Amino acid sequence: MSHQIFNLQNQNNHKLSYQTWGPMNGKPVLYMHGFPGSHKQADFLSRFCEQNNIFLIAFDRPGYGETSRQLCDKQSLSQVAVQLLDYLKIQKVSLMGISGGAPSAWQFALDYPERTNRLGIVCGLAPFTGDFKRSFPTFHKVGLNIFSNLSDSVRSRILKSVIKKGQPKIKFQLFKKILNEADRKLFDRKDLVGMLMSSLTWARNQGSLGVEYDLQTYSKDWWGSRSVQVPTHIWHGENDRINPVGMAYQWKKIFPQVDLHIDPYEGHYSILVNKHPEIFKELTKDI
């Protein structure tokens, strides 16, 4: 299915762009895309979902794709997600938070445990607070500290300039230099690079608005020290050089009941590409 537009109730012209894959009567999984990105990151899972009775749903966060930047000015992203699920007539869903989409997945499970089957976090970004900060790489710490101390207007001007000048092909080449072997191998696959480039291009549809929204979220304490009440699984590559594995170990320290799946060979991108059959099996086994 091509992407769809959902007009939210009681919102003036505010839109949510989303896409689904697999049979509508399949096992529902809500996919929270990474940063910066869009729902198109899930395109490579299309055939798997069709063959395994998975109904995968992914939407663009505010400012990405065609989703209105003002979407969450008066409501949370979790509330927006619930409206979409109601529209699709889905009562409960399993969550898959990928990298920078992890905060959105955590927040939904914390806000609506009654609507959550299982929570799955894959190479997930942790909250930039407390002991979690020790796990953040230097480039994360510097970026978030600078961002949080700038005025809205200055942040906006800087991000607009970066987004305007940045080219996806150049970004991929720069990323490739810092990734581990498993991730670098993926960047040699034209199909996956094409998918990621398509996702980035769509994410830039409204310029820097999506990046601004996400960075505002990441620089706050979005967790709030709340307790998770749903079965939770965390998958992380031991060699993840974007979101270091220490983030996953810190969650396990806080929530001992969490099922932690650490792969000694996988990196940031490869963990989802290589382990998605295992991930989907775990997240949908009770549905």
Image (tube, grey):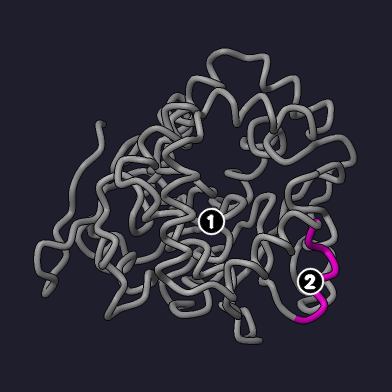
Q: Amino acid at mark 1?
A: Gly
Residue wearing tag 1: 101
In the image, what residue occupies the spot 79% across and 44% down? 240
Q: Earlier in the sequence, mark 1 or mark 2?
A: 1
SS of the residue at dot 1? helix
Above or below for 17 versus 220:
above
Start-end of magenta stretch: 130-137
Residue 219, compared with residue 30, is above or below; it is: below
**In this view of the protein, which residue sits in the foreground, 37 or 204?**
204
- Main secondary structure along the magenta-highlighted residues: helix
Tag nearer the camera, 1 or 2 = 2
What whole-number distance in Å separates the C-alpha atoms at marks 1 and 2? 18 Å
Q: Does residue 119 sit above or below 266 in this rendering?
A: below
| Residue at figure coordinates x 85%, y 61% from the top left | 246
**Residue 14 lies in quadrant:** bottom left
Residue under pointer 2 = 133
